[in-house]
Image: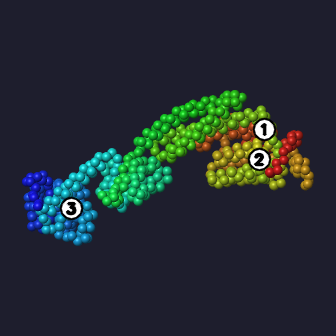
Amino acid sequence: MYTKPPPNLKQTMKILVVEDERIIAINLKESLESLGYTVPAIAASGEQAIEKATEFRPDLVLMDIWLKGTIDGIEAAQQIWDRLKIPTIYVTGHSDQSTVERAKITAPFGYILKPVKEQALYVAIETALQRYEREQLLSAILRGIGDGVIVTDKDCRVQFLNQVAESLTGWQLAEARDRELTEVFNIVDEQTQQPVGDMLKNVLEQETIIYLEEQILLIPKQGKPIPVADSIAPIKNNNGAIAGAVLVFRDATQQRLAQEKNCALERARQLEYDIAELQCLDLLHDESLSTASLELPTSPAKIKLAVRILETILDQQSLFGSQLRSDVTVIARYWQIVQEQGKQKLNLVNDLLDIRAIETEVYPLQLTLIQFSEWMLDLVKPFAAWAQFQQQQLHINIAPNLPPLVSDQLSLTRILKELLNNAFQYTPAGEDIGVTVRVGGAGGAGGAGEDKEVLIQQFTVEIQVSNSGVEIPPDELTKIFEPFYRIPSPYPWKQGGTGLGLTMVKTLVHRLQGEIEVMSDRDGTMFTIFIPSLQSQGTEVEHDHDQ
């Protein structure tokens, strides 16, 4: 049997009545007061309900669905909840399916049919208030969590965001509610920049917790991408069915920076050691080559090996793929210094030793018959692709019936590669690079059918390597063959060599008993080398059958 609650038990609970039929509104007010509740006002329209709720801030609203005016009870209840978070119980004489379904969208705290019985009214109110109290407690807990929290329904639509989630995503709960999670929580793979929003669907399908991978970026509504981490878990109802999912995430920026800072400190110690060695190597320009031949190769080779090993480790840890901020930029800068300087110093050592070996004639010349038409085409193949990539024009002009040259093919190959490397490195896009080969002195071929060695007579081959668009100042032309000298360039980043390239070229040309000249004007620069056939020197000639 129903018993009224003791007087004044619920006197502090204020309930706003919204009913456009005056008699029913008065009856509701009397029933509520007899149950111990306070009724601060009665509203007869949706607009008036919003106004009174804002003024009196009741604990609950009893709302008739069908109201006069432009706003009905369902819309008024939704606005009151969105603005004031005050729960609503619908009181209506309509129980048709369409009305109920429309009312359910606003997630009311109760639904009472007219005529209203006092016992049913009391039970509905107490149930709604208890539910509201529990939900507010849960909401306060979620709002107080230091991580971002997003709750979705089983259709992957957002139902709740706490303040941290609002801050990180840039979405407010009111505008995010019922939107697709992928729109509000837009995450991409940091390496590929491809969306990874299907993770929630995997949670719902597999009914298991999924942890976000380390390399995940959140793209907020406004602002820069944020690295995030944590997990997505399914929500199950009392029957064990999936009702939605909860996503807990946090800004991982500081954590990443701390990890990378620790790695940077470890690497910095090694970098300091390597840089100190590189500085010592700079003093080698003035040291004896005899000492260099014994000790120079060791340190750069170790640096090169250490760089390769460290690079492999860092690639495995995906540190170079990170798009994080200033710390990584500093690390990358010093890393590049070690790589470039180590490679440059190793090349420097090798060039110094090669020049010394050439000058002291440690290795004898390996004379062979060089067929220019075949050898030259093979030599320039890589440069043809380079020219296409840099939008340059490469022209090869080999005189017809050019007799084979007796010389050291390895030395001549190195000479031409060095000259072509310089030409391609310093020639602007759209300009021309040319190689011309012709007989530069007396000579020719004998009659057909004679032995190949007999056919070759004493002559000189003239090879020209030219490029347009670059002029070397006249006062620089006399210095370009000096060791460690670099021509001043408006593009300093292109000066990555050792400063020994042209010194090496001149040394090799003289080793082949030839000469080298250089001319430069506003039309371009041309290097011309004269290489004699060395068969008449009485040296044994190797026949290159591959030519």
Using the numbered discs, state the Cα–Cα distance from disc 1 to disc 3 in whole angstroms: 102 Å
Residue 347: image quadrant is top right
Residue 353: image quadrant is top right
Label 1: which residue? 510
In the depicted view, which residue is nearer to us: 139 or 540? 139
Q: Is residue 396 visible?
A: yes
Q: Is tag 2's residue or tag 1's residue first in the polypeptide sequence?
A: 2
Q: Nearer the viewer, mark 1 or mark 3?
A: 3
**Mark 3 nearby-residue class (10 Å; few <14, some 14–19, many ≥20):** some
Give the amino acid at mark 2.
Ile
Give the amino acid at mark 1.
His
Q: Quadrant of the N terminus?
A: bottom left
Find residue 510 and report its horizontal and vertical position in percent: 78, 38
Of helix, strand and loop, which one carries label 3? strand
Using the numbered discs, state the Cα–Cα distance from disc 3 to disc 2 in whole angstroms: 97 Å
Of helix, strand and loop, which one carries label 2? strand
Of helix, strand and loop, which one carries label 1? helix
For the point 66% across and 32% down, which residue is it? 296
Q: Is tag 1's residue or tag 3's residue first in the polypeptide sequence?
A: 3
Label 2: which residue? 463
Q: Is tag 3's residue or tag 2's residue first in the polypeptide sequence?
A: 3
In the depicted view, which residue is nearer to us: 393 or 149? 149
Q: Is residue 430 visible?
A: no
Using the numbered discs, state the Cα–Cα distance from disc 2 to disc 1 in whole angstroms: 15 Å
Say the numbered circle drawn on residue 110: 3
For the point 26% across and 64% down, which residue is it? 104
Find residue 226 and report its horizontal and vertical position in percent: 41, 48
Q: How many numbered marks appear?
A: 3
- In the figure, is residue 150 to the left or right of 326? left
Labels 3 & 2 near each other (Cβ < 8 A): no
